[in-house]
Image (cartoon, helix red, strand yellow):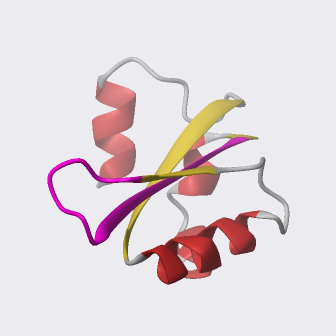
């Protein structure tokens, strides 16, 4: 389980912290849609064109949460 991996690295699973979320998008339009979705409760994100692949975009955001909450199935499903 991902929770065990995080805990084995010394993190407090129930402690709130800033957590970076990173997504890949194929095309700028898809990156825009992901960034727009971040506006519903997440901090403003950033998007950048990948250096090696001209059709691949990196989209990132950050939120304050617990590791347990971002590994919960409901959160992962919401992100997908």
Which residues lie in the magenta part?
A: 49-63
Residue 51 sits inside the magenta stretch: yes
The answer to which image quadrant residue 7 occupies is: top left
Percent x, y of residue 61: 62, 48
Viewer-nearest residue: 70 or 21: 21
Question: Is residue 5 toward the left or the right of residue 77 in the image?
Answer: left
Instruction: Please name the residue shown 47% across and 74% down the image.
Output: 28
Q: Position of residue 2 (x, y in %)?
A: 33, 51
Residue 71 % position (x, y): 50, 57
Say whether residue 65 is left or right of residue 80.
right
Residue 5: where, in percent of width, then height? 28, 38
The answer to whether residue 47 is magenta is: no
Against 42, residue 4 (above or below) is above
Task: Examine the rendered structure and indicate whether residue 41 appears above or below residue 5.
Answer: below
- 64 vs 30, nearest the viewer: 30
Q: Looking at the image, which residue is at 62% across and 79% down?
A: 33
Q: Is residue 43 above or below residue 54?
A: above
16 or 32: nearer the viewer? 32
In the orientation shown, which residue stands out farthest toward the left? 52
Please report the residue visible at 65 percent of the width from the left and 66 percent of the height from the top: 35
Quarter of the N terminus within the rendering: bottom left
């Amino acid at each position: 389980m991902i929770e065990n991996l995080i805990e084995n690295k010394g993190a407090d699973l129930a402690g709130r912290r800033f957590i970076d979320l990173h997504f890949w998008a194929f095309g700028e339009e898809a990156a825009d849609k992901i960034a727009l979705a971040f506006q519903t409760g997440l901090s403003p994100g950033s998007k950048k064109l990948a250096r090696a692949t001209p059709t691949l975009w990196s989209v990132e955001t950050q939120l304050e949460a617990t590791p347990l909450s971002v590994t919960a199935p409901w959160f992962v499903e919401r992100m997908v």
